[in-house]
Image (cartoon, rainbow, N blue to C red):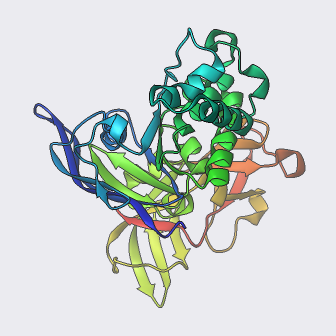
Amino acid sequence: MLDQPLLDLQRVTKRYGSVVAVQDVNATIRRGELVSFVGPSGCGKTTLLRLIGGFLRPDAGRIVLDGEDITALPPNHRPTAMVFQNYALFPHMTVAENIGYALAIRKRPKAEVARRVEELLALVQLQDFDRRRPARLSGGQQQRVALARALSLQPKVLLLDEPLSNLDAELRVQMRAEIKRLQRDLHQTVVFVTHDQEEAMSISDRIMVMYQGQILQAGTPSEIYERPATIFIARSVGAVNFLEGILTDGTRGVATVATPLGTLLIRSVVEGVTSGDRVCLVLRPEAIRLGPPEDGTGPNRVVGRIENAMYTGALIRYSVGVGESRLTVDLYDPRHTAMFREGDQVTLTLPEDPHLLPA
């Protein structure tokens, strides 16, 4: 069940000399949950994953797995398994031998090893590749072998360290779906490290955003995307516009904000700010609507000019100048909606329910 805690990180800290890589981290991961740690390079996410796997020892704090303190246990004594960024397959072994390696070195009966390998080959859909060596496999196939090998001992927690970074864009998308399928089919608890926010958004039950060794926010993908706790987090997950202003009224859930684009009406609940406070409106590109210039009257409507248009197939991303401001606007399904050209005058309708942050 997803509401049952399985992995508990209690004030975990890791230092390298004077550099604090992970600082006083508290986090709980529930049974059967896929949690992604995201953040820029050097934020501590891979260090935290290696601490969970036992490849590093924390300088302070405890790691508790299924009620057992595993802080001092080496990797081979922990009920965890890691898939490394480079897969770490044995080149001289066949696919079947790679998958069964962990079972074989634990001297499991040969019949049991063979049966388990056959199950895992079917699970990752590589039944016809059992006698091939890694050099004769594609990147995606090697990734599946690495996953099968990690799952061979039925770990309580599967650790994935940027496992898709070596794949091309199309294969990355396919492997995201494959990892999610395996996680759901096996009810497997997974901790996933990636710097790719789209990757994390697409497969995670929850995301933990890290910066400078700390977790800044933990939540579902929609919570992180729609209600980021800070401007840094808003920038970390998808394209975004920021519009600063001053809250000029805020009663009974309705507010007005004075901005460089004019006074905007905000109908979302405004918490933690009062009249006169500086605020920052978080505006996602897809939340802004575009229309012809004659639509330029009404609440939250401003007139601008298309400065740039980038067609990507599924959407057109516009850069729209409004006075001294520049807004990014995404128009999806351009085949069936009105398209604008560079230089066109347009009306932008800004949402009445943006997320507000202190400026």
* Left or right of 310, for residue 257: left
Q: Please report the residue visible at 38 percent of the width from the left and 59 percent of the height from the top.
A: 66
Q: Please report the residue visible at 26 percent of the width from the left and 35 percent of the height from the top.
A: 56
Q: Position of residue 168 (x, y in %)?
A: 65, 24
Q: Position of residue 143 (x, y in %)?
A: 61, 27
Q: Please report the residue visible at 49 percent of the width from the left and 29 percent of the height from the top.
A: 102
Q: Give whichever of 89, 347 is nearer the camera.
A: 89
Q: Is residue 309 visible?
A: no
Is 306 situated above or below 245?
above
Count of number-bearing discs: 0
Q: Residue furthest bottom?
A: 252
Q: Residue furthest right?
A: 336
Q: Quadrant of the N terminus?
A: bottom right
Q: Quadrant of residue 46?
A: top left
Q: Position of residue 290 (x, y in %)?
A: 72, 56
Q: Quadrant of residue 348?
A: bottom right
Is 266 situated above or below 55?
below
Q: Quadrant of the C terminus?
A: bottom left
Q: Is residue 311 visible?
A: yes
Is 3 situated above or below 200?
below
Q: Give whichever of 352, 162 is nearer the camera.
A: 162
